[in-house]
């Protein structure tokens, strides 16, 4: 089929997702979020606002927390991506996931994957964060259920647990 | 209407010369994209006028912060995270490091860039008043060569800049002569992260014999462009006890009108009369 005028061809994109090498065809301006969800069926990252305000599509791109709705997939070429699905790959639950359950940090669950990844990113940089640092680390992730206190408590609890 | 990715071209030449050649061969056709925190928002909403994007996220010379004896040169694609982490920037240019910490949440700071903030030219951008008070210069580069523009002359009107259609911002230079100055930064917004400023202030001054002199003041979100308050700075230099009081008490006609927004915001926590 000849592409219609103004239609650009897909190109090959390779990257690593949760430790697994992936190769797929995509339009370079497809959002990383859509490729993860639709092509790779990793539906943990959610679309909340679609404009980088809510953080529910957060993933780690080469270890950096990013909003995957704002990343053209072509910019993820060659990168290593971690999503919520890979966080507990070798254990039943990541300590942060356990702490979220215990503290009531997850309610409707839409923000939870992004919250957990933001918290993973925070604890990697600051293993024993003060409350102000937890608030700052999660400030780009909006939650409409919990009122945030249970989430902050969960992150502090997980940090204590890991530190032991 | 959501954008259809099939209608967009995206190229990633990976080096500065190739980017500049493409910008020169089809001026105004190609939109540079770095971290995408502005471009992708418009794109997703189907409001991006350009159909051709050129990747500048992977150009090494745009990602460097270089320190010289008399200044620092910040590559245009340096992220807010890089600015916050940089020792000299946070020590000698605290207004810039503070503004970087106000800009979005951590995810957007990991992708948003200083050059992008300048090129996007929002009058509400948090980092731009800091650049005004630090007497920043921007280097614009094209296949024709490069030129330096004082940052205070860069914005000519709402979303209008000195950038020509074939030009790219290469770096932002700050002179290293403010390390002994006192500084004060203030943002009034619905919340710090992820909220656009209703007003933001960058204030810088030198203390000599108990008074503040050589005052540099700039405001964001109060005018069509980030605003340096030259007159207020000059007339209020003597006798001021704090930079914020000095900024809010400006008595010159144009400046003082704008400063009332800062004052209202400061007193009430929110600038309720903000025209936005």
Image: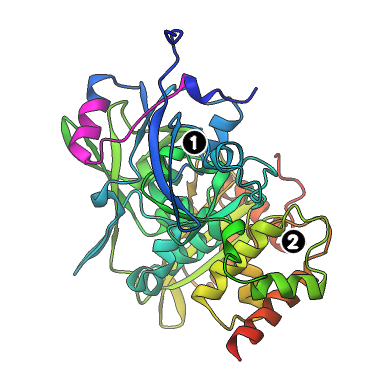
Name the mark on residue A57: none
Pinpoint residue B160: horizontal percent, then vertical percent.
44, 31
Pinpoint residue B104: horizontal percent, then vertical percent.
57, 54
How far apart marks 2 and 1 lie (CA) works out to 31 Å
Name the mark on residue B39: 1
The residue lying toward the viewer, choosing from B83 and A66, is A66
Say if B116 sits above or below B99 in the image.
Answer: above
Chain letter for mark 2: B
Where disc 2 sits, the SS reads loop
- Please tell me which residue is depicted at 67% across the width and 70% down the height of the picture: A92
Where disc 1 sits, the SS reads helix
Say if B253 sits above or below A81 in the image.
Answer: above
Name the mark on residue B269: 2
Observer-side mark, 2 or 1, equals 1
Chain letter for mark 1: B
First to last magenta residue range? B7-22
């Amino acid at each position: 089929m000849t592409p219609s005028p103004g239609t650009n061809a897909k190109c090959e994109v390779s990257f690593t997702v949760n430790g697994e090498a992936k190769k797929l065809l995509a339009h370079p301006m497809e959002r990383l979020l859509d490729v993860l969800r639709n092509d790779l069926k990793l539906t943990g990252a959610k679309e909340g606002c679609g404009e980088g305000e809510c953080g529910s599509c957060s993933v780690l791109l080469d270890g950096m927390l990013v909003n995957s709705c704002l990343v053209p997939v072509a910019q993820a070429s060659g990168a290593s991506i971690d999503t919520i699905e890979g966080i507990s790959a070798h254990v039943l639950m990541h300590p942060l996931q356990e702490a979220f359950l215990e503290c009531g940090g997850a309610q409707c669950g839409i923000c939870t994957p992004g919250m957990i990844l933001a918290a993973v990113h925070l604890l990697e940089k600051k293993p024993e964060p003060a409350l102000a640092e937890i608030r700052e680390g999660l400030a780009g992730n909006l939650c409409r259920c919990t009122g945030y206190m249970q989430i902050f408590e969960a992150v502090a609890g997980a940090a204590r647990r890991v530190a032991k | 209407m959501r954008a259809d990715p099939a209608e967009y071209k995206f190229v990633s030449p990976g080096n500065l010369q190739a980017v500049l050649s493409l910008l020169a061969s089809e001026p105004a056709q190609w939109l540079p994209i770095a971290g995408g925190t502005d471009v992708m928002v418009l794109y997703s909403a189907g409001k991006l006028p350009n159909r051709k994007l050129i990747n500048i996220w992977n150009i090494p010379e745009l990602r460097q912060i270089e320190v010289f004896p008399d200044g620092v040169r910040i590559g245009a694609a340096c992220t807010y995270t890089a600015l916050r982490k940089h020792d000299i920037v946070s020590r000698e240019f605290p207004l810039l490091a503070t503004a970087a910490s106000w800009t979005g949440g951590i995810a957007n700071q990991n992708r948003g860039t200083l050059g992008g903030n300048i090129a996007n030219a929002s009058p509400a951008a948090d980092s731009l008043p800091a650049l005004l008070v630090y007497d920043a210069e921007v280097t614009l580069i094209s296949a024709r060569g490069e030129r330096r523009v004082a940052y205070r002359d860069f914005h000519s009107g709402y979303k209008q800049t000195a950038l020509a259609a074939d030009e790219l911002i290469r770096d932002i230079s700050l002179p290293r002569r403010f390390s002994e100055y006192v500084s004060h930064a203030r943002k009034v917004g619905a919340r710090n992260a992820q909220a656009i400023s209703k007003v933001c202030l960058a204030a810088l001054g030198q203390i000599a014999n108990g008074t503040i002199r050589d005052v540099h003041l700039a405001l964001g979100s109060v005018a069509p462009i980030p605003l340096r308050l030259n007159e207020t700075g000059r007339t209020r230099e003597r006798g001021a006890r704090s930079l914020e009081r000095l900024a809010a008490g400006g008595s010159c006609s144009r400046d003082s009108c704008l400063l009332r927004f800062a004052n209202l915001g400061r007193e009430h926590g929110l600038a309720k009369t903000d025209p936005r």
